[in-house]
Image (spheres, grey):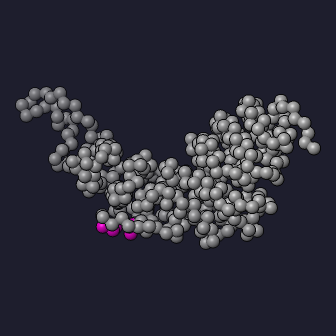
Amino acid sequence: MLQKFPEKFYFEGLTDVTGQNQQHAYFPVYFSNVCLRFIPVLDIIIHRYLEFPTSTMSIPLDSLLDKFGPLYKFHDRPLTYLYNTFHYYESKLKDRPQLKRKLVSSIIGSLKDIKPVSWALSDSYLHYSRKPSDDTNWLPDLDYYIKLIGKVVDTLNGKPPFPHVDWRFNEFPNAGAYILHVTCIELMALPVSASVVANNLLDVVMTGHKVIPRSNIENWMNAIGVVLTALPEPYWSVINDRIIQMLQSALLTSAPHPDPFHLMDFTNSYFSTSELQTKYLIALSHSVFHHASIGQISLLPSFLREKIKPEIRTEEQFLFICHIIAPFLHRLNIERTRVVIDLTKELYSLLEVVDKTCDHLRFIDPICDLLYHIKYMFIGDCAKADIEARIRNLRPALQMRLRFMTHLNVEPVS
């Protein structure tokens, strides 16, 4: 490349062979060389290639990466570029495992001469990347995901599994940001669908808790929440599907449980070794929603309205949803108050459905306590008209307890 397009110094181009002055302005070479200046052009070419159908491209991307991929050795932020590419073009790449593997091997593989073997990718993925280009058959088992999340947990605990790095001269400011990016890159580059990856990440705790140290379970949940929320929407939205599946389970839809609050208290039951799947899911939901961006968590009202409301029938289901939603009301009230108001409206809507479905409500007082807490701590009278309309449709016992929410004159229930 440099032999074909040699760099010109400014004073070499002042005069031509005839001794006449030339008006050409040469870019000073102390800024970079032609290879470094081509890297951002190659970044754009790759993205444009992903945006257009493959049939319209005269040169395959594989050929471009084979020829120019080694330039990423000089890229100032190669992992960030790869992460952003996989994240933004997830819909374009989800059915192209060969291309994903090629991007990973070209960009990360360009640094193999100056980096340790396992500086970014796991040994399992490195073994997969060495397979023939047309062989993308690999279905990682749960043990693979446990090891991957285990590296994140160790890093967040101050024990990074990679060699010492001088973060002053790295594209990432610390080990936590580094392990998060390389983990997400590997997960997005797997030759399986987003739902399979996300469900396996959740199963690291839901199923694999048997092999996780019991004293460290919160750190594992925290790591899963951090990783899931850093992935595109098809990955982190799987937690919503798990919530719906749990709502449909016999545990919450069959005969009334003698103590449904015991089904949802993770902390106390975990230390007494009496935890259930409902408790694990609630704890994982808290981890995911805690680390989610405000844009991600702002979708909760529509989730309740469109997905939860058609499924909810029992008092246990309503209490399960309250245990998931209530801990984030304070955060939402600070960052986006309107979402708290919308969530409150949806909770009253769900309560109205449960009231019409159940012959007897056993936990009216705890439910009303939560609704009063939301009113006096967060929304005040902001949704008074909507709430009053809902309360008018409730049974007399609920109207009596919620009478201070509105101006209704309710006679005491005998």
In x, y percent, where is residue 341? 69, 36
Q: Residue at x 26, y 36 (%)?
A: 27
Q: Is residue 354 above or below residue 116?
A: above
Residue bounds of the magenta highlight: 126-132
Residue 90 vs residue 134: left or right? right
**Residue 347 within the magenta-colored segment of the rendering:** no
In x, y percent, where is residue 277? 66, 63
Q: Nearer the viewer, residue 381 or 174?
A: 381
Q: Quadrant of the C terminus?
A: top right
Q: Is residue 281 above or below residue 300?
A: below
Residue 269 vs residue 162: left or right? right
Determine which quarter of the picture holds residue 369.
top right
**Residue 131 within the magenta-colored segment of the rendering:** yes
Q: Is residue 374 above or below residue 238?
A: above
In x, y percent, where is residue 380? 76, 33
Residue 36 makes an appearance in the image: no
Q: Residue at x 72, y 41 (%)?
A: 348
In x, y percent, where is residue 389? 74, 33
